[in-house]
Image (cartoon, rainbow, N blue to C red):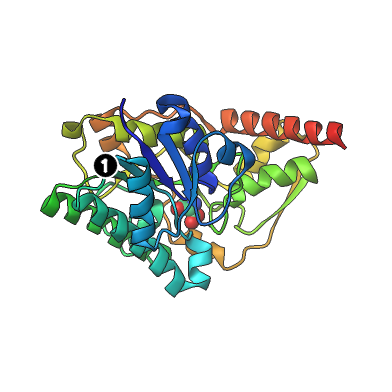
Amino acid sequence: MNDTILIIGASGQIGSELTQKLRKIYGNQQVIASDIREGNTELMTSGHFEIIDATNKEAILKVIQKHQVTQVYLMAAMLSATAEKYPQKAWNLNMNSLLNVLDLAKEKHIKQVYWPSSIAVFGPSSPKKNTPQKTIMEPSTVYGISKVSGEHWCNYYHEKYGVDVRSIRYPGIISWKTNPGGGTTDYAVDIFFKAIENGSYDSFLSENTRLPMMYMEDAINATIQIMQANTKDIKIRTSYNLAAISFTPKEIANEIKKHITDFTITYHPDFRQEIADSWPQSIADIDARTDWNWQHQFDLAAITKDMITNLQAQKNKKLENV
Ligand code: AKB
């Protein structure tokens, strides 16, 4: 493996864990972390770190040339809830960063690109259950519009210029190391933090809102797996549907209660409810499973156990250090 990898948006929820996993596989010096802001100590000290504004093509090129980068994972993005507040900013970041990286691949500065899409590409007119790979895609959010457009740009650069770009439509991602920010599925992470801190959670989505979700470990494995797959096996160059599990706030609360018996939940839906209601409840991902052997490992029970064990251990450690 002679690749040198640049991760743009390495300080974020997925970027930070992806960087550490790639450093384990490719070696610390071969994986360059970058972001517009600094990340956690582990990220900053275990390998190279560069400050990059993803909307600045020259700044990206400079780092690519400095480290002789061959692959870019573009993880910088403004997520659904924040994008509704800052539509112009979201469009600027989400689209221009992608076009910058696709152009750099077209100009042969890099060989391979990873770019995440999302279940947000689907909208109120898409089928709600087992949403297929190819179906009506009329998103009602700025974030969703940017992801659908991005998918078409990826496919266009592949078809016209032979750019090797690969993509997955992520569901909500659950993790305990780095908090997500600005997403609609963030409740499914926050609920664990609040369960450990306070023993209660006030949900911004209603109790029966079912959304597709996945544990971080599965999401990272899928991301690396699609990038390492043989080119001939990547048959979709827009973005692959990817699924693990689906649950509601009520169901996750009931699972948490199995570990924290006096845990309580209340529901006060806000503007994010409308976003969640526009998205699928479950996703059909047969193409990813057939083309590059995608399989998820974690179900709701396994996620809950792992989240609570790790967050409890983190809390105990903090208490010991006080
Ligand atoms: C969000 O909630 O905006 C993201 C996503 C589903 O892409 N987690």
Q: Is residue 197 at least partly visible in the picture?
A: yes
Q: Which residue sits furthest front?
A: 66
Q: Is residue 122 at least partly visible in the picture?
A: no
Q: Residue 147: x, y in percent?
A: 35, 58
Q: Which residue is at 53% across, 63% downward? A: 81
Count the marks: how many?
1
Q: Residue 215: x, y in percent?
A: 52, 36
From the viewer's perspective, tell me whether residue 303 is left or right of residue 280.
right
Q: Which residue sits furthest left?
A: 160
The residue that mark 1 highlights is: 112
Q: Residue 235: x, y in percent?
A: 18, 39
13 or 32, which is in the foreground?
32
Neighbourhood count class around disc 1 (C-alpha, 10 Å): few under 14, some 14–19, many 20 upward: many
203 or 62, which is in the foreground?
62
Q: In the image, is residue 83 above or below residue 237?
A: below
From the viewer's perspective, tell me whether residue 110 is left or right of residue 24.
left
Q: Which residue is at 34% across, 60% downward? A: 58
Q: In the image, is residue 151 above or below residue 73?
A: below
Q: Which residue is at 30% across, 59% downward? A: 100
Q: Quadrant of the C terminus?
A: top right
Res. 309 image quadrant: top right
Q: Quadrant of the N terminus?
A: top left
- Does the Cβ of the disc 1 residue fall within 8 Å of ligand 1? no
273 or 19, which is in the foreground?
19
Q: Which residue sits furthest right?
A: 322
Q: Residue 145: x, y in percent?
A: 35, 65
Considering the numbered disc 1 on the image, is that residue within a helix, a strand or a loop?
A: strand
Q: In the image, is residue 89 above or below residue 257?
A: below
From the viewer's perspective, tell me whether residue 69 is left or right of residue 157.
right
11 or 130, which is in the foreground?
11
- Kind of residue at disc 1: Gln
